[in-house]
Amino acid sequence: MLEISVELTKSPKQKPSESEPLGFGKYYTDHMFIMNYDEGEGWHNPRIVPYQNIALDPAAMCFHYAQEVFEGLKAYRTKSGEIQLFRPEKNMARLNLSNDRLCIPRIDEEFAVETIKKLVSVDKDWVPHGEGTSLYIRPFIFAVDPYVGVHPARHLLFVIILSPVGSYYPQGLNPVKIYVEDEYVRAVKGGMGYVKAGGNYAASLKSQAKAEELGYTQVLWLDGVERKYVEEVGTMNVFFVIDGEVVTPKLTGSVLGGITRLSCIELLREHGYKVTERCISIQEIYDAYESGKLNEAFGSGTAAVISPIGEFRWGDKVIKLTESEIGPVSQFLYDTLTGIQWGKIEDTRGWTQKI
Ligand code: COI
């Protein structure tokens, strides 16, 4: 395995006060990880350095053609003061899935997990203590060749930064309102919707801005061909409870395979819930609501954890589920997942890794 050099900062930053809500993505720690890829040499020179700007040539390919992928995972401080990661090997496997789709050289997954552990341990004092807080870990890879022709990069950087966070939504665990987007689309089968590429999120901004203007928190995407089937929400996968059965869109090639989504499915099945992954039309959701069979809806994601959905707006139709109540399935998943992540519930599945 490559040796990671460490250069410690000489001017540590002031940490945010934990008596104020941390919010999401506002603060960054003292250090970052960086590693180069150069054709012929492969990935090399892994180093932990003080958090700093990155100087790039204005022709760097990432600025022009968005050859960039990223991941999101968290480090949690347990009750006994230990720090742990949640299924980091799954994030690193997904990073390679994204790399493959965007012609980015694969990384060594085991090395990447070890690197995350080393970086988090250097900045361990930044893992927040407050209830519901964690250290968000953002690995990303981007093309840096100074070349404005369209071609897979020969020179890239792999960077990891860390950010102490609270809840992603200002609403916390309170239900969010979602706008069903039937004009723009996020992805189509054969595109890159199933991987974590920055470009997918760039494509989402127009709708996100529209939703916010109308007073909604995020967008529910429909399939790109028929605008009929439900795919995912802005930064989350989506689940519905219809007549006691949990249903979630199946991964048909345009939906991100969330690690929280997978963990929810596994936990629910273990606890005797019927969970089905299939195509679900928005009309079916509306019909279930009209007939009183739509019991609950929620989103799942690393940043968002479990987020109950209180309302959907689909054209002129409104699906009003709840203003403030958290459904039993959402509550069960939130309690169990966060219980394992923060070490309040014993991890019997080997999902956590100590730093
Ligand atoms: C995550 O949940 O980690 C994500 O990557 C969503 C992000 C775009 C905020």
Image (spheres, helix red, strand yellow):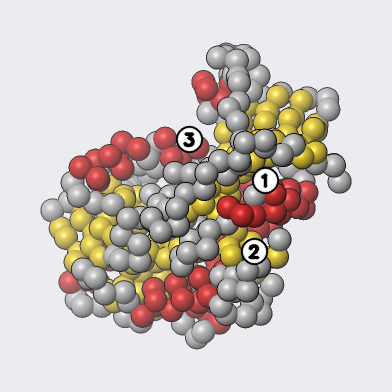
From where the camera sits, is residue 116 visible? no
- Residue 199 has which mark? 3
Q: Which class describes the residues within 10 Å of circle 2: few (<14), some (14-19), or many (20+)?
A: many
- 78 and 199: which one is in front? 78
Q: If you read the primary sequence from the N terminus, does the residue marked by circle 3 or circle 1 appear first?
A: 1
Q: How far, Cα to Cα, is label 2 from label 1? A: 25 Å
Q: Quadrant of residue 354?
A: bottom right
- The residue at which mark 1 appears reads as 96
Q: Residue at x 64, y 77 (%)?
A: 347
* 335 shown above or below 26: below
Vertical placement of residue 166 versus 335, above or below:
above
Secondary element under disc 3, as helix, strand or loop, is helix
Q: Which residue is mark 2?
A: 83
- Where is residue 177 drawn, in percent x and y? 25, 58
Q: Is residue 230 visible in the rendered structure shown here? A: yes
Q: How many marks?
A: 3
